[in-house]
Image (tube, helix red, strand yellow):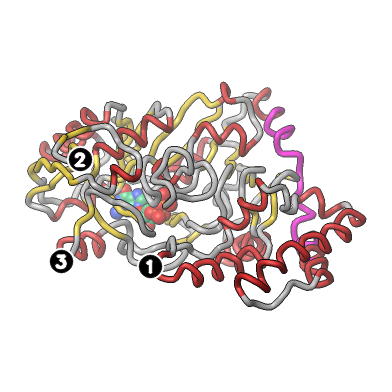
Amino acid sequence: MVKAVVGANWGDEGKGKITDMLAEKADIIVRFQGGANAGHTIINNYGKFALHTLPSGVFYHHTTSVIGNGVALDIPVLFKEIQSVIDQGVPAPKILVSDRAQIVMSYHKDFDAYEEERLGGKSFGSTKSGIAPFYSDKYAKVGFQVSELFDDELLKEKVVRIAELKNVLLKHLYHKPAINPDELYDELQDYKKMVEPYVCDVSLFLDHAIREDREILLEGQLGSLKDPDHGIYPMVTSSSTLAAYGAIGAGIPPYEIKKVITVCKAYSSAVGAGAFVSEIFGEEADELRRRGGDGGEFGATTGRPRRMGWFDCVASKYGCRMQGTTDVAFTVLDVLGYLDEIPVCVGYDINGKVTTDFPTTHLLEKAKPVLETLPGWKCDIRGIKEYDKLPENCRRYIEFIEEQIGYPITMVSNGPGREDIIYK
Ligand code: GDP
């Protein structure tokens, strides 16, 4: 069976932990979109890891980790990650890289940084991992596909063509050093050496696996609201974050995705610019940020403090709907145990009209949160294993949110560890 693990919101919902946990019973874990721009933090018996490219299943001996064609493949980052995992005592993971994945080149990262510099105060808050220039090139059909590394004739011709194209912008728009085609060729040769042992026809591999009834997890990056079509455009990422895209980014039939586990955090956090209706500020935000996640809400890739907010039922209902949610995994609930009262955003007031339907960006920017306050439970819920043992106000919080978003919460995560999970 194929299951997707995806985010309902702006990312950082705890997908890594849920994938790592579900991977115990899985055979194959596939990354299907995104690149090394966001990270998953995973804590397990080997230690604490920040993964950017490797799927969250690399810690099990029985799993195969797959980088699907939809991923922005940063080969040096992938290699550093494989090495760091091995260095921390994890058995060498089985890794496959799609021959149809495209490669993040060093100039993509340069272009990312140059563009942020050019935009100055109007920048997107990019992590400068090259993701937007990479996907632009993929769709402009000037990217390098892994398979092309093995066609030397093509490569020699293509580096000249690409350098010519890129150098126009480098010279006239950014006033930066030009790309030398020979250096580009050398860069690609280095990548070829690194990636060669892992290259595979991934869709064929997955077709066999599906026929053999293997358990396959598709692991999403970021969340619904960062989707380029359905998110808060233009403050979005450059590849689809939706479970539906899992079929394309992995190369499997859409009807094989039988379960969509949408991860939803018990409060909100976001990185980068863009409207964030339930955002909170000052000491209130600082305290939640300090206590949030595991060791605070700071970016796994950048270390940037995340923007904080109360749970947003409007955004989450929409986020779950766009994912095609069958199950909600409700995470990081333990963090809220310090609050006397917990505000929840239940509607958006846009020009005096209250709605519970998530609007497009220009209206979203006008939205003011309609808050409802629920009583806190004022205790530590870590270590609780059964739903009925949770404090009454805690269950009320979960059930209130379940009712508001309209999708079943079947898992509640009450700590960062694999075993910190309550099935409802
Ligand atoms: P992802 O990108 O969606 O995987 O999310 P992140 O890794 O950025 O954020 C999740 C953070 O919260 C990580 O530091 C996790 O270890 C931590 N985490 C996940 N689930 C829980 C939970 O239920 N409780 C607590 N306290 N931390 C959690």
368 in magenta? no
Position above or below: 424 against 269: above
Mark linked to residue 350: 2
Residue 187 at what x, y percent from top left?
A: 77, 67
Task: For label 3, count other residues whose C-alpha is less than 10 Å away and answer few (under 14), some (14-19) or many (20+).
Answer: few
Q: Secondary structure at mark 1?
A: loop
Amino acid at dot 1: Arg
For residue 405, which quarter of the picture? Answer: top left
Q: Residue furthest front?
A: 172
Task: Count every numbered label the image shows and give the total.
Answer: 3
Residue 149 sits in which quadrant?
A: bottom right
Which comes before the other along the chain, label 1 or label 2?
A: 1
> In x, y percent, where is residue 99?
75, 45
Q: Percent x, y for residue 419?
A: 37, 45
Q: What number is the disc on residue 212?
A: none
Q: Quadrant of the C terminus?
A: top left
Is disc 2 placed on a helix, strand or loop?
strand
Viewer-closest of 140 and 422: 140
**Type of amino acid at the residue the image marks with label 3:** Glu
Give the residues drawn in magenta, as a range.
190-207
- What residue is pinned by disc 3? 283
Is residue 203 in the magenta section? Answer: yes
Extreme residue in the right direction: 153
The residue tagged 1 is 304
- Please give the name of the residue rendered at 71% of the width and 28% of the height, measured from the top-left corner: 208
> Of the residues under marks 3 and 1, which one precedes in the sequence?
3
- Name the residue type under label 2: Ile
Majority secondary structure in the magenta region: helix
Secondary structure of the residue carrying tag 3 is helix
Front tag of 3 and 2? 2
